Amino acid sequence: MRVVAARFLLLPVLCIVAVVIAVSVTHQIRAQKADWFETVPYGEVFRKDMTKKATRLHFYFHDMVSGKNPTAIPIAQAPTAPIQSSTMFGTLRMIDDPLTEGFDASSKVVGRAQGMYGFAGQDQLSLIAAISYVFTDEMLKKGSSLSILSNNPILNSVRELAIVGGTGSFRFASGFAQVRTLFLNLTTGDAIVEYNETVIHY
């Protein structure tokens, strides 16, 4: 009888202990969740320099599909793309293209274009591009980048692409790039494209 009574007495105590532990754990979880973000006044983020700047960039983009060391390689392709589509609709390429100061490939490299573009047009040759332009030139903070997410109708003589963000020297960037193809080998797909970018940033 004493053993049974002891068990009945221990049961409420164990329940109370379990509730205390549960409340404590819940409180800790809530505290941890509250620490993962912080909202501050706008002025505190930009207290050093709240002035917007405009930067213009001019460089050349070398997209080499052929050769022993291509800078653009196919990573996905619809089964019908090479057979039924004259626009290569459904083909996706990953790129790591050099950006140079001059038209010639041997001129100074100022950055790399890294990302991907896909052939997105069924009836016309058109790309959808998701690319980061990572700059290595000492005139910019090393590793500063601009991100482009835009349609690119590559047969148009001049195209306008949207700049949607940036890092480093181009934090909070927005703007546009006017691009034109200066060289295109229709057999290999190799191309050299001129970029004129206007960027608004802090």
Image (cartoon, rainbow, N blue to C red):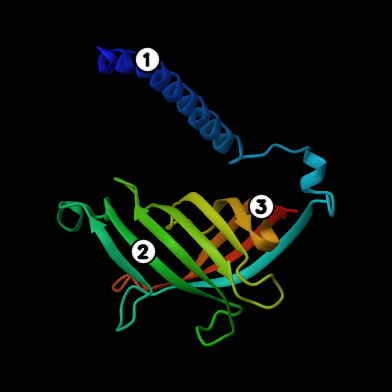
Q: Residue at x 38, y 74 (%)?
A: 71
Image position of 196 with respect to 139: above or below: above
Q: Nearer the viewer, residue 48 or 117?
A: 48
Instruction: Tell me the residue that label 3 is attached to.
Output: 173
Between marks 1 and 2, how big is the CA–CA gap? 69 Å
Q: Residue at x 26, y 14 (%)?
A: 4
Q: Residue at x 40, y 67 (%)?
A: 95
Q: What secondary structure is found at the residue carrying circle 2?
A: strand
- If you read the primary sequence from the N terminus, does the residue marked by circle 1 or circle 3 appear first? 1
- Name the residue type under label 3: Ala
Q: Residue at x 55, y 79 (%)?
A: 103
Rendered image: mark on residue 9: 1
Residue 156 image offset from top left, x and y in percent: 47, 55
Q: Nearer the viewer, residue 106 or 111?
A: 111
- Horizontal side, residue 100 vs residue 68: left or right: right
Instruction: Tell me the residue that label 2 is attached to.
Output: 94
Q: What secondary structure is found at the residue carrying circle 1?
A: helix
Q: Residues within 10 Å of mark 1 (few under 14, many from 20)?
A: few
Identity of the residue furthest to the bottom in this view:
106
Confirm or deny contact between disc 1 and disc 3 (CB under 8 A).
no
Q: Nearer the viewer, residue 98 or 81?
A: 98
